[in-house]
Amino acid sequence: MEITYLGHSAFKLKGKNGTVLTDPFGDSVGLSFPNTSADIITISHQHGDHNATSKVKGTARRSTPFIVAYPGEYEVGGISIFGVKTFHDASKGEERGTNTVFTIIIDDIRVCHLGDLGHELSSSQLEEIGVVDVLLCPVGGHFTIDPKQAVSAIQQIEPSYVIPMHYRTEKHAEMFSEVQPLEVFLKEYGVQPAPQPKLAVEKLKLPEETELVVLGINS
């Protein structure tokens, strides 16, 4: 299974049974969303920087992507998806509403996308999420957990790989000015890996200790 980063909270997961795209973003983000296709789209919450499904084309397998936008269990073309209800803030959704954490099982790899998680995960939520091979974790704060909280979440979940997302770049619009850049999280985490264009993940070759991977934006 191959993972590429499209920017913000959008990733493309390409496996033998199909392609999943997470949280496609609209023009308001400031980044350019690439011309791309997918069999399945997951939407962590209904904000314009996470739910721009019209930006994504269908594939030879599926002319229109199957959209998963709510908690529950889904099985689409040999790909399993489990959604766990969380919140977009630390006030049980009073400020920004709910958020869905999706665990996507593709090529026997369990990829967990935290969306715009805004709080520490409870023991019951961690139990629902279960084992995680690859964690896609917001790290920028303001709208999501901040760098310090992100490190704590990574320690709670104990994934084989963790890939940071939802941090400010030079191309982000003014509305994201209070979001921290990637460097702040990397300093908090204590590792400075060189960016790579994609991550190929194999079940039998997962690292024993959590490995931080920074992916360059493919736009």
Image (spheres, helix red, strand yellow):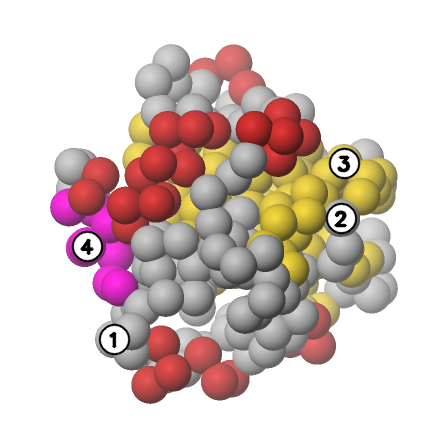
**What amino acid is found at the position of numbered circle 1 in the picture?**
Glu
* 84 in relation to 105, above or below: below
The residue that mark 2 highlights is 71
Q: Which of marks 2 and 1 is nearer the N terminus?
A: 2
The residue that mark 1 highlights is 170
**Are the residues at dot 4 and dot 2 in contact (C-beta closer than 8 Å)?**
no
Residue 125: in sight, yes or no?
yes
Q: Nearer the viewer, mark 3 or mark 2?
A: 2
Per the image, label 2 sits on a secondary structure element best described as loop
Per the image, label 1 sits on a secondary structure element best described as loop
The prevailing secondary structure element of the residues shown in magenta is helix
**Are the residues at dot 4 and dot 1 in contact (C-beta closer than 8 Å)?**
no
Where residue 46 appears, as percent x and y from the top left, is 67, 70
Horizontal side of residue 54 vs 137, given as left or right: right
Disc 3 to disc 4, how far (Cα)? 34 Å
Label 3 crowd (10 A; few <14 / some 14-19 / many >=20): some
* 52 in relation to 3, above or below: below
Residue found at x 26% / y 64%: 180
Asked whether 185 falls inside the magenta stretch, the response is: yes
**What amino acid is found at the position of numbered circle 3 in the picture?**
Ser
Q: Which of marks 3 and 4 is nearer the N terminus?
A: 3
* 77 in relation to 61, above or below: above
Magenta residues (range) = 180-187
Q: Earlier in the sequence, mark 3 or mark 1?
A: 3
